[in-house]
Image (tube, grey):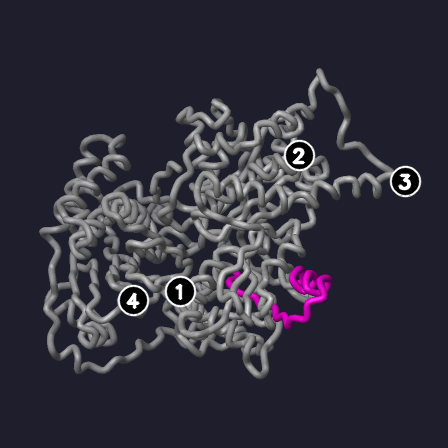
Amino acid sequence: MKYNKITVDGNTATANIAYALSEIATIYPITPSSTMAEVYEDLSNKNTQNIFGDVPKVVEMQSEAGAAGAMHGALAGGSVATTFTASQGLLLMIPNMYKIAGELLPNVIHVSARTIATHALSIFGDHSDVMSIRGTGYAMLASSSVQECQDLALAAHIATLTSSVPFVHFFDGFRTSHEINTIKSIDIEDIKKIYPYNKLKEFKALALNSKTPHAQGTAQNPDVYFQNREASNKYYDNVPNCVEDAFDKIYSITGRRYHTFDYVGAKDATDVIVIMGSGASTVEQTIDYLNGKGKKYGVVIVRLYRPFDSKRFIQTLPSSVKRISVLDRVKECGAQGEPLYKDVVCALAEAGKQVQVFGGRYGLSSKEFTPSMVGAVYENMTSNSPINHFSVGINDDITHKSLKITNVIHPSLQKVYACKFYGYGGDGTVSANKNSIKIITETTDNNGQAYFEYDSKKSGNATISHLRFGKGEINSPYLIDDIDFVAIHNETYVTKYNVLKNVKPNGIVLLNTSWEGLTLSKMLPNHIKLYIAKNNLKLYTIDAYKIAKEIGLGNKINLIMQAAFFKLIDIIPYDIAKKQMKDFAFKSYGKKGEVVLNRNYSAIDKAEENLKEIQIPSNWAKLTSCEECGATSCKYFKEYIDPIQKLEGNELPVSSFNERGYVPTGTTQYEKRGVATALPKWDSANCIQCNMCSFVCPHGAI
């Protein structure tokens, strides 16, 4: 078995397989799936060959509906076609998906599952989009990690040919699509060994062409439509077998074992969670920890969701199970329960299994799903008054269906170094951290994981990077809450956010600031100084904006802060880290010319000499913490907007929200981000009062 250790995100892992196994991609970008199309197009532009020895084509259409229509046409013509989408984009493909499935055209659509706009638009991830297409006739395969994105993408492309049923391969938007992790790649020569070329030949023999003419997509009346609709049953009945066969083939070249349903946990478990997507990894990690303390918990991870193979599901359950909680990452208003819950209830009823089943919702719109929440789900099952159709991760103070988190669980059984970075959208922090995790994993024997919290307002708002690295595999799809190192890349954040929350004793704090001496002590809030002193944190400062301005980089402080990070964490000898950073800088900026490249090299060099350790005054430990007072008496701002601005929106209860998503007007007057490190100055001598200043000042007066 040949493989390389690579550090990629879920989108890239998927796109690499899709490219190798298709001849054309018809695309239309939509967040968070766009990266898949970009990777695919980049490979095509570089004339990279697929397993057939060809360079796949890429066609960008005018909409997702157009992409699906063009894909349908390509499939009918005998081409192996694919596409990538999410959310409303997937919904626009539904009419063509019904046609493609009805004509049994093998095909894979890769979906980074995302919230569908309801009372409000959300670009973040849950399963509302993929659950909306379960009636189209597409089989549905779910990945729960970056490694699985690669492996199950391959399984989907194999199984669609062997079954003649089209597939949707999906994974959680942002949580998996944008998570960077160290995985074991699959060698293209190994893929060739297991690819069903005979089935590909059969598919191409059915293509619409002048040599083998036929008609398809006809109109039918009531006398024959029903019978013709039932004629495809045998193909769907065979899908689980085809998927299992594909998994066996993948095992033969990788040693990684998958099934349509995988059970993890105690052999005699009485309480079992059923789940799919990234939450499965969180549950798996949590029960390893809890079972080590004497519990008898288990989890069934759903990989093939459609067709739902009831027989294999029942066989996967331990015979000792008494209670099951089914977790859905979607809400279906008015339904008796969410989709996966109803499938499980139906499977148990048909098998005559007397098991108590609870349904629950979690993680809508990328809401956090943590080990502590997993613990609450198990506790609910075994309580004297369990809640059915519950929610977890929120405070539902209206219908009182939410589970309370009573125990905080940190389940990691290995030493992992955890780092958190508060960046400013557009300052390059995220890009630098993507490079940092690759430098660490490529230069050392560490594995790595990186995840990024983006604000939907993008440039100008906070971005929070979460990096983990350690010797073992890291599969923790939840935010870091046990921090060794924190970097604050904008000094104003110390007055806006609780930036030191969950930093471990003896941890390291890096602050980008122009404050020095007494000014620093004056500007840092008391609660920050108190936390530093009581937890024996080491505080370092650097004026990255001053350095960037001096060397001509404007507000791009990413390399300066990256260099300071590597200097402080001491995981790689700094000389080696420095060389690696410059190598990555060359890859990113080499085409922009020697002047730009040297500026970035200078940013790395100057970081070390400008890094300062702050000696913590003894009186910081004697301070009392106080809260800042709001600047407005607006009730809506104080109770709703202000907590969101402080990154505390997760704590707002259900009662804080209007049922229809309505909000008062005129509240943006209070929303002052206050993150600028420099303010413009008006030069009245140059101003001719042209009234263009809101757009651009053409006379250099500002």
> Is 549 part of what is drawn in magenta?
no
For label 3, the crowd category at 10 Å Cα-Cα, with few meaning under 14, some 14 to 19 and many 20 or more, is few
> How far apart are the alpha carbons under marks 4 and 1?
20 Å
Q: Quadrant of the N terminus?
A: top left
> How far apart are the alpha carbons under marks 3 and 2?
25 Å
Residue 603: tell me if it is visible.
no
> How far apart are the alpha carbons under marks 1 and 3?
64 Å
The type of residue carrying mark 1 is Glu
**Element on which disc 1 rests:** loop
Residue under numbered circle 2: 105
For label 2, the crowd category at 10 Å Cα-Cα, with few meaning under 14, some 14 to 19 and many 20 or more, is many
Residues in magenta? Answer: 342-364
Identify the mark nearer the N-term, 1 or 3: 3
The spot of residue 230 in percent (x, y) is 79, 43
Mark 3–mark 4 contact, CB under 8 Å? no
> How far apart are the alpha carbons under marks 2 and 4?
52 Å
Identify the mark nearer the N-term, 4 or 1: 4
**Element on which disc 3 rests:** loop
Rendered image quadrant of residue 628: bottom left
Identify the mark nearer the N-term, 2 or 1: 2
Rendered image quadrant of residue 472: bottom left
Residue under numbered circle 4: 499
Residue under numbered circle 1: 671
